[in-house]
Image: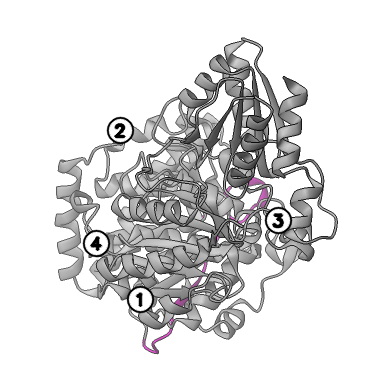
Amino acid sequence: MLQTDESRAGAWRELRRKVDAADPAERESLIADQARIIRRHIITTIDAARAGHIGGDLSITDVLATLYFGVLRLDPSEGDRLERDRFILSKGHCAAALYSTLARVGYFAEDELASFMAAGSALNGHPNRNKVPGIETNTGPLGHGLPVAVGEAIGLRLQGVDSRVFVATGDGELQEGSNWEALMSAGHYGLENLTVIVDRNRLQQGAGTEETNGLDPLPERLAAFGCEVREVDGHSVAELLAAFGPSTTGKPVAVVANTTKGKGVSFIEDRVEWHHKVPTAEQVALALEELA
Amino acid sequence: MTETFDNRKAFAETLIELAADDERVVAVCNDSVGSSNLGGFKEAYPDRLINVGIAEQNMVGVAAGLAATGLVPFVCSAGPFLTGRATEQIKADIAYSGHKVILCGMSPGMAYGELGPTHHSVEDLSWMRALPGLDVAVPADPRQTRQALEALVAEPRGTYLRIGRHKVPTVTDEDSTWERGRFNSVREGKDVTLIGLGTTVARTIEAADLLAADGVSARVLNAAWVSPLDRDAIVAAAEETRVIVVAEEANISGGLSAAVAQVVAELGIGTKVIPVGLTEFAPTGSNDWLLEHFGLTGGNIAEVAREAL
């Protein structure tokens, strides 16, 4: 199990306090800056491993930065505390984005990112809670995170704990039927402590989602399953912060975060071939320049 | 006629008792309140029964999430659908993630008789045994069922338990213990070892009686643990008796007999291991008829042992 980086965790706590105290414009700018740093870490992490899922990593980054720097009530030094908010990355192939975020929060040292997918590393290609602090459940096969999140939301409510559970799925991932089983339960149980975030970048591994097995009209479908649906720009920190507010209807919240796969690097954006392509040394330099 | 007892009743009663003493105990099911005998639990603890409807993948994931908040979930669902429909959830969400969920496969083996192979849970031992991080245990009578549940609440662990549907005779002594990874020794013997689990334990005892009448001394082991396996008991059987017959209400490809054979093969001492179990999808028939069809009777188990000696 990797160890907490106390110095990084301290810096994160200070930044959280600053974000909480800031006016909306400053808050947005502080979080967006963390997202930029996380994107840089994603690029260097994938470069070091010469592997990873760069497109989906970059599309979910603003969601991760907004959650960990502006929303979630948790602390890397109290990883087992029952009264913590929980986040599950169901699209586990985007582990590099999650690791870069968790390291930024201080769950482990940022130096460790260089070991991503190396032999014997804790940082497997898909997240493992038994080796990496801050991971709630092991994901990788698609359609697993949402049912577990539903169980956590029921479990917290049963124990009278008012913490919240957030889970992020890919949009292509919603083609797995287990998600819809879980959404039925979330609606049936009225899990207002659950927020489902869909990274709606409209691309999956081989083609567009709508060409492959269409999800539209996605907001209507989610609403029909009993969710309070909020459709936002998934790269707007301000819109995400608003969307991550508590349920107002007693229903689970579903946030459709409209995103661009590969966001932030011009030549990767919205291109299906960049699902898990690895940039060349020259492309890495270009990407880091764009994210400077 | 030997008196028989209901394992499911023992399961349900014990679960309610444990829930009374420990608020962490919850039940999770898939529209299986009736078939899992959870009516009493539902009445006593309506909020602690999470019925997700007919949705096994979600059921197992939800149980993992409940465990992640410190609860002790007992998933109660017909064995074939629990282990077949949700195999990947059992692998990723429980065995690999390490969430401490107790999966109770109800009515396993060919308990559903005439309903046919879709409703038989005879692959479960092979599938579940392949997963590191998951215990696999088969209580053979109500006493072992009670002991298994008590042990799991005291120390929760990712586990697959087979809970039989049909009444069974008592096959354990009053002072017998339930120890992780330990077979229960039913009878000493020096010529042949008969190993059964769940429903077949009583049938191996019957076979041992028949063999004794012929002057053959049969050791009988109740293999209540398929994973972790009792290597010591298997090694002793291989070294001290000439033949091992394994009788299981399950597919022999990958089940208990395969597990035993692997241990014995590693020894390289030539002890024969003979499986008695399923080799194909079952024809139409009652549970009793099917057990006879596949040779899972005292008479046939004794005959198999006799021929091998």
Residue B110: give its label: 3
Q: Are marks 3 and 2 on the same chain?
A: no
Task: Give the mark toward the camera: 4 or 3.
Answer: 3
Q: Are marks 3 and 2 in contact (CB under 8 Å)?
A: no
Q: Are marks 2 and 1 on the same chain?
A: yes
Q: CA distance from mark 4 to mark 1?
A: 14 Å
User: Helix, strand or loop at disc 4?
Assistant: loop
Where is residue A170? Give x, y as percent.
Answer: 55, 60
- Front-most of residues A190 and B274: B274
Query: What subunit carries mark 1?
Result: A
Q: CA distance from mark 3 to mark 2?
A: 55 Å
Q: Are marks 2 and 4 on the same chain?
A: yes
Crowding at dot 3, Cα within 10 Å, few <14 / some 14-19 / many 20+, comes out as many
User: Helix, strand or loop at disc 1?
Assistant: loop
User: Helix, strand or loop at disc 3?
Assistant: loop
Q: Amino acid at mark 2?
A: Asp
- Front-most of residues A158 and A41: A158
**Is residue B94 left or right of B122 when viewed as pictured?**
left
Crowding at dot 1, Cα within 10 Å, few <14 / some 14-19 / many 20+, comes out as many
**In the rendered image, which residue does mark 2 sit on?**
A111
Of pointers 2 and 4, the one earlier in the residue sequence: 4
Q: CA distance from mark 4 to mark 3?
A: 42 Å
